[in-house]
């Protein structure tokens, strides 16, 4: 991260012993000192308008959009430029890495709008975590060649915190209507979480959807 000029590091539920003894490379101790620790991925990316997970496809079939690392870098840079120029100083993006042992789980990826993959030989699809981070951050921070970038995602999208509020309202409405479809209900809300991130609603869309489901919920509760 220090090599590529990135400063904001968030750690999710680290193993306490390893984290307390963690050492930093020369010239980058402040990255560990200033890192924020969260109990869950949902808390860590709460304010993020675009979240891209990382991993290989050799043992999973992701329901999210799959991007090359170059496309992921373009999408994240575009989202950062959009929020900055739009005056959304607190809006953020996130690039998420899993553990060295097993990477990101299906539950982790449910919080992501897309998954970015580093193209490797099929004989060895898995990369060392530190090497994967270096490749990803190179793509994220490299200067564009001046050509017009391909727009991979809408220019403005609702952040994760507000998407979770909508998801909770939709689930509440489904329960009130006794709509127990297997396709949208799961023990931890993953299916609905993935669906809302596929739709990529902006703030105006989200307000309309919240208003619609609130009205439906009110009618369900006040109709004899």
Image (cartoon, rainbow, N blue to C red):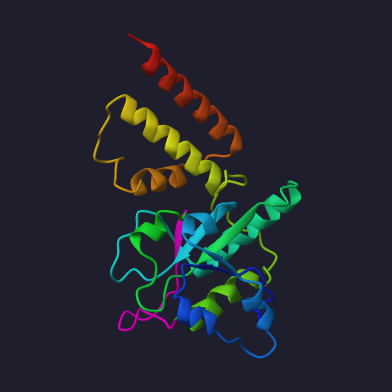
Q: Foreground: 160 or 62?
A: 160
Q: Foreground: 179 or 114?
A: 179
- Residue plotted at (47% across, 19% down): 215
Q: Is residue 211 visible?
A: yes
Please name the predominant secondary structure of the magenta segment in the image: loop
The N terminus lies in quadrant: bottom right
Q: Position of residue 132 (x, y in %)?
A: 48, 78
- Residue plotted at (70% across, 65% down): 146
> Where 209 falls versus 134 (above or below)?
above
- Residue plotted at (48% across, 43% down): 164
Read off the magenta span.
113-128
> Where 168 falls versus 153 (above or below)?
above
User: In the image, is residue 211 part of the stretch drawn in magenta?
Assistant: no
Q: Quadrant of residue 157?
A: top right
- Residue plotted at (60% across, 51% down): 47
Q: Foreground: 148 or 113?
A: 113
The answer to whether 218 appears left or right of 51 in the picture is left
The answer to whether 143 appears left or right of 57 in the picture is right
Q: Position of residue 67 (x, y in %)?
A: 46, 62
> Where 25 falls versus 164 (above or below)?
below
Q: In the current view of this chain or complex, which residue is farthest to the bottom?
A: 26
Q: Position of residue 85 (x, y in %)?
A: 75, 50
Q: Is residue 67 visible?
A: no
Q: Position of residue 126 (x, y in %)?
A: 37, 79
User: In the image, is residue 116 part of the stretch drawn in magenta?
Assistant: yes
């Amino acid at each position: 991260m220090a090599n590529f000029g990135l400063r904001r590091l968030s750690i999710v539920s680290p193993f306490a012993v390893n984290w307390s003894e963690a050492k930093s490379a020369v010239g980058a101790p402040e990255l560990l000192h200033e890192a924020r620790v969260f109990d869950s991925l949902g808390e860590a990316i709460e304010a993020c308008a675009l979240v891209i997970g990382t991993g290989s496809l050799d043992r999973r079939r992701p329901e999210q959009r799959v991007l090359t690392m170059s496309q992921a870098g373009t999408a994240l840079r575009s989202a950062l430029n959009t929020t900055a120029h739009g005056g959304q100083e607190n809006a953020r993006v996130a690039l998420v890495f899993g553990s060295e042992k097993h990477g990101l789980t299906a539950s982790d990826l449910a919080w992501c709008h897309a998954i970015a993959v580093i193209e490797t030989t099929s004989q060895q699809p898995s990369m060392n975590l530190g090497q994967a981070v270096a490749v990803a951050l190179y793509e994220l921070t490299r200067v564009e060649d001046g050509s017009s970038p391909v727009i991979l995602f809408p220019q403005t999208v609702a952040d994760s915190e507000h998407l979770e509020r909508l998801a909770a309202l939709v689930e509440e409405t489904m329960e009130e209507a006794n709509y127990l479809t297997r396709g949208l209900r799961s023990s931890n809300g993953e299916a609905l979480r993935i669906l809302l991130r596929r739709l990529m609603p902006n703030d105006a869309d989200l307000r309309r959807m919240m208003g619609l489901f609130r009205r439906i919920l009110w009618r369900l509760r006040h109709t004899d």
